[in-house]
Amino acid sequence: MDWIVVVDDDRTNLIMAGRILSDQDMRVTALKSGNALLDFLKDNRPDLILLDIRMPDMDGFDTMEKMKEMISEEDMIPVIFLTANESPESETKGLGLGAMDFIRKPFVPEVLVMRVRHTIELVRLQKDLTSEVDRRTKENETLSFHVVQTLAEAIDAKDTYTNGHSGRVAEYAREISARYGYSKQQQDEIYMMGLLHDVGKIGVPDAVINKPGRLTDEEFEMIKQHPSVGYNILKNIKEKPKLSIGARWHHERYNGTGYPDGLKGDAIPEEARIIAVADAYDAMTSHRSYRDVLSQHIVRGEIENGKGSQFDPVFADIMLRMIDDDTEYEMKED
């Protein structure tokens, strides 16, 4: 059972959060101040802390700073800030302190439950990955292709309509990088980035990923969160610091209209620009619930039309040469 601590000086908020989370079979502890939380943490380790920003005596930011003084980075408990008046300045400060998210008050029950669950799942996955890396490092090994491939297969399994998507994107990205002149080591790195570029989809509800019809605006916003979620999962794997690049920036567009950061041109990491072309190519050459694999002629035209807008022209041209070399149209989902 997940254990959530809610810290708020308002009794009504404590009662409401407690009811919402308890109804979802979560254990809830309610505390009314930052000092009460610090005392509580001397002997307890909950799974997540919901921490109000505006409190008398010691606000949420000061409380979190003191938490970081008493708890090591490895053992730090994830924190989501609660706020009635979210501002860019508060969000910047909170994220800078290491908060995982912000939740606005008054609570929307579905949003509160979803964000709490996704944060706990994200942190656990991150710890599992880090633990795996640590174990292999102690054995003088690096994160193996087998481990990454297994994780990639688990991600792809969430999507009923794709089969082997991550593996194909990784293969295409490696071939683009080889033709561009990457070393063998760099090719292996981008292959692994490609395998894990969609790892953030683990935080997207299956019903949204597998919806056969058009997504609502709210559902599309959920999908758009997966690059940031993937980045947060992978960024702390110190032995493979580049793994997170493909996850965060593979939906950026060369003209700056992509997400999550709206990067433009060379500001987008080179590996992510390569993976973006590979990802788009596989999306067009894979079966979907609403269409079959597109013809090679149409796919080539889409890549050509995306040069300089969606794609880096250099890597789009390499992809076009790969298409032209594929005279039997074998680069597609079977």
Image: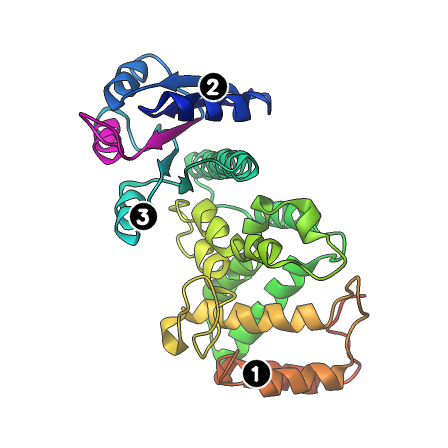
Residue 232 against residue 324 in the figure, above or below: above
- Give the crowd class for mark 1: few <14, some 14-19, many >=20 residues within 10 Å: some
Residue 242's x, y, as percent?
Answer: 42, 57
Of the 4 image quadrants, the one containing the N terminus is top right
Q: Amino acid at mark 3?
A: Glu
Task: Indicate left or right for 245 with 174 as reference.
Answer: left
Determine the image quadrant of residue 219.
bottom right
Task: Indicate left or right for 265 with 287 as reference.
Answer: left
**Residue 73 highlighted magenta (yes or no):** no
SS under mark 3: helix
Residue range of the region highlighted in magenta in the rendering: 48-68
Question: Which label is found at residue 91?
Answer: 3
Determine the image quadrant of residue 275.
bottom right
SS under mark 2: strand
Q: Nearer the viewer, residue 238 or 285?
A: 285
Question: Which label is found at residue 28?
Answer: 2
Looking at the image, which residue is at 46% across and 58% down?
A: 248
Q: Which residue is mark 1?
A: 306
Distance of label 3 from label 1 (alpha carbons): 35 Å
Q: Nearer the viewer, mark 2 or mark 1?
A: 2
